[in-house]
Image (spheres, rainbow, N blue to C red):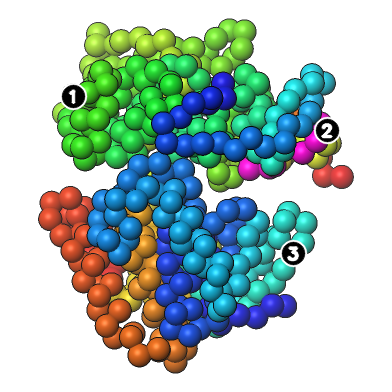
Amino acid sequence: MRIEQHPILTFEKKKEVEFTFDGKKMKGYEGEPIASALHANGVMVLSYSKNSHRARGFYCAIGNCSSCLMTVNGEPNVRVCTEKLREGMVVETQRDRGDLK
Amino acid sequence: MRKTEIAVIGGGPAGLMAALAAAEMGAEVTLVDKNNNLGGQLVKQTHMFFGSEKEHASTRGIDIGKLLAKEAQNHSKIKIMNNSEVIGYYPDDGVIGIEVEEEKFVKLKADKIIIATGASEKFLPFVNNDLPGIYGAGAVQTLMNEHGVVPGNNVLMVGAGNIGLIVSYQLMQAGVNVKAIIDAAPKIGGYLVHASKVARLGVPILTSYSVKAAYPNQITKALERASIWKVDQNWQPIPGTEKVLKVDVLCISVGLSPLAELLWQAGCNMKYVPQLGGHVPTRTNDLETSVTGIYVAGDVAGVEEASSAMIEGRLAGLNAAKSLGYDNGTYEEKHQEALNQLHDLRSGPVGEKIREGISQLVS
């Protein structure tokens, strides 16, 4: 799902890092949004709505719409469309509204 | 508490131009942006711009963004706060609250504020419109052009305005199949030059069509199919005209609405103007809102496009600086020039809607 060739753009190769999604090991690039790393790994469902349990993906990709909230390193309600990926991050599907620590 | 003469909120085309214009007049400016890179939505615009030389016509949006960002970074009068999200404006004491790098809370007090926060994508009601795989067209553009990831394999684009047409073309540049572009209006809303580009590549553009429903894959829960149907001249769907498309991505490109939260907080007089995308502030010709010292520029002042956002930015920047007594001797000339450029951009049939909208706002 990553673009290999493009007529206009070149994408500089960033450092590859490992992270986990619901316990599964995945690879992405350091500093890219978590959502883009997940998408590149074929993950489109990021959370479930808390009342009707409907699957949710991202929508706006620029941190406005709150459709992409996930639990990252134990912290709920992280906007993964703008949150940068770091080595060893623990990313989890969010199914409820989460608790503040 | 930090202090600045002019705070510019938002580092897209409008905000960058505002900061540059105010600094050029001699004012000291702080430019606040939530992203790491300045340029706003210019960072994903791979197409060349129209308009005049001054707004970098014939240059790709992405390059205009870099050019302006560099100019702002090198300007001694401009202090840049990136990765800094404004989370509130407190009108009682005029303080802007900013979350920096997601960990520090910084208070900023400015003599004048220019709000250039842009707009966000509108949504469309239809059955199952919340399925993963249904994205704003701009979101897909960000994913592809900024981060190098394609959204899927087969796309249905909803909306044949300029964004819908341009993003469809960009999807094809990235190797993605665009099955169709549909629009509920009876004719294509975007420029003919953009429509021709995608039509030449064999993408059908279906006017008077709307989305009926989206359907998920039972295992992945993400989008698998979408059905569309024809609408009559009263926008009512016509049963029996349904078509089903096998798509894993549905892009919604039905317009933008201004990100006006800070204007509401500041107590600016707001008005609902459909021609400009939603609630927008009333203002003077010089882009000052009903709250003295708060200026607006770009999409937050009414959804238009990047060239006019840049000129509005310059106008707001010039005026905010002038109101503090700054003038390097070129204010009169530059001020008049900006007004003339806006007038020219909005003249003709294409600018009719914008002219109608703005006439309801300017006092």
The residue wearing badge 1 is B232
Question: Looking at the picture, how far across and down is residue B342, in whole percent?
Answer: 25, 66
Give the Cα distance between marks 3 and 2.
27 Å
Q: Is residue B280 visible to the viewer in this orientation of the structure?
A: no
Secondary structure under badge 3? Answer: strand
B332 in relation to A74, above or below: below
Check disc 3 and give the amino acid type: Phe
Mark 3 to mark 1 CA distance (whole Å): 53 Å
Identity, as a three-letter code, of the amino acid under mark 1? Asp
* Mark linked to residue A88: 2
* Residue at x 28%, y 72% (from the top left corner): B338
Rendering coords of residue B213 (x, y %): 41, 18
The local crowd at label 3, few if under 14, some if 14 to 19, many if 20 or more residues have their Cα within 10 Å, is: some
Q: Residue at x 37, y 47 (%)?
A: B60
Residues at marks 3 and 2 on the same chain: no
Q: Position of residue B199 (x, y in %)?
A: 23, 24
Same chain? Circles 1 and 2: no
Region rendered in magenta: A80-90
Depicted B30 relative to depicted B138: above or below: below
Q: Which residue is mark 3?
A: B105
Q: Quadrant of residue A17?
A: top right
The kind of residue tagged 2 is Gly
* Residue A84 among those drawn in magenta: yes
Q: Residue at x 27, y 83 (%)?
A: B333
Q: Is residue A16 left or right of residue B251?
A: right
Is residue B191 at all visible to an observer of this figure? yes
Q: Nearer the viewer, residue A94 or B92?
A: A94
